[in-house]
Amino acid sequence: MKTAREFVLPPLGAPHWLSSEDPPGGLLYLAWGRRHYGCNPIPLRLHHGWSYLAVMAGHPTFLWENRKQVLRTGDLVVAGPDLPYGWEDRAGASCELLVWAWSSAPSFENVVDKHVRWMRRGSLVSIEELRELHRMTRREIQDSDAHSPRILQSLHTLLDATFERAGGRDMDFAARNMQRLRLAEEWMRRHLEVRAPARALADYLAVSPMGLQRLFRGTVGLSPGEAFQQLKMREAALLLRRPGVSVKGIAYALGYHHPGDFTRAFAKFHGNIPSVVQENIKNPTKKRTASLAKKRRFPS
């Protein structure tokens, strides 16, 4: 029996978009939001175009040919136009999907007409990237103009790269975090005068404030503020070695409104106040006596 080819539309009210006869930029279909495949399963069908499927929440069962696969959050699938597929789920369960359907094939290597490609290791970062790509695609449909076909074609290319990166793991999650951490450190060193850097740093790295916390806690075991403070204090120790530099000047250069605040922070980190450290650099023979005296006044 020949399998029908159609878009099985979701129940009334479930968010989706279906193109007209002339799909803009090759975009045929969009779907997003919650689905209840336990109550509304989709039987095996040949779908129009190439389907890009991203599981954002839940554990739906993907059907293709005579096989079934329970998917999980972060699983990504690309299904070709000659691959019959459908969905089912446990009774009462729900899932969240992002779906694109394009008339042209993806730019992945070794893609054939009858194809399903599993990419199981989508990270939290790639999931958020896919959410934003889907939002951008929907906005372009809603605010369509003469430029939209070209923009949608570019979004298709970007979607290909995002899917392939998430599945191929050209750079693993740990390496990606270390790269972001290096960028964060470079930014911090250029902005040592900033008093509360977390929001600006998160914006610079294009992550949420919570994502920034996870990055630092997971890689260096410190909060962004603690890591920033360490950089400040190490820079302060280097500046104290420069001739003609005053403690007050260093305090202001590092973003402190009052030199006393800088002195207390420096003593807490280094175990000695900056003026004594500066004096010890000039007169190393007095270092022990001066250091001990000041440590009693400013305990670490």
Image (tube, rainbow, N blue to C red):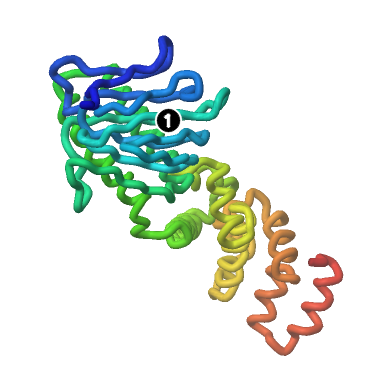
Please tell me whether mark 1 sits on a helix, a strand or a loop.
Answer: strand
The answer to which image quadrant residue 130 occupies is top left
Residue at the limit of the structure toward the bottom, as seen here = 285
Report if residue 203 is visible in the image: no
Task: Please state, as top left, top right, bottom left or bottom right, where the N terminus lies in the image.
Answer: top left
Task: Return the x and y of residue 27 as percentages of the image width and height.
Answer: 21, 27
Residue occupying the point 63% across, 60% down: 221
Residue 287 location in percent, x, y?
74, 83
Q: Is residue 141 visible?
A: yes
The residue located at (48%, 56%) in the rendering is 184
* 173 in relation to 38, above or below: below
Question: Which residue occupies the extreme top position in the image?
Answer: 12
- Up/down of 286 relative to 72, above or below: below
Looking at the image, residue 232 sits to the left or right of residue 180; the answer is: right
Query: In this view of the protein, which residue sits in the foreground, 126 or 289?
Result: 126
The image shows residue 36, relative to residue 125, as above or below, that is: above
Callout 1: 10 Å neighbours few (<14), some, many (20+)?
many
- Relative side of 133 to 215, left or right: left
Q: Residue at x 71, y 54 (%)?
A: 261
User: Which is nearer the eye, 198 or 18?
Assistant: 18
Q: Quadrant of the C terminus?
A: bottom right
Question: Between residues 172 and 89, which one lies in front from this camera angle?
Answer: 89
Name the residue beneath numbered marker 1: 97
Task: Give the amino acid at mark 1.
Answer: Leu
User: Viewed as shown, does residue 46 lie left or right of 288?
Assistant: left
How many numbered discs? 1
Foreground residue among 164 and 193:
164
Residue most extreme to the front: 1
Q: Residue 290: x and y, percent? A: 78, 79
Q: Residue at x 53, y 26 (%)?
A: 94
Residue 204 lies, in percent from the top left, at 43, 46
Quarter of the image where one finds residue 220 = bottom right
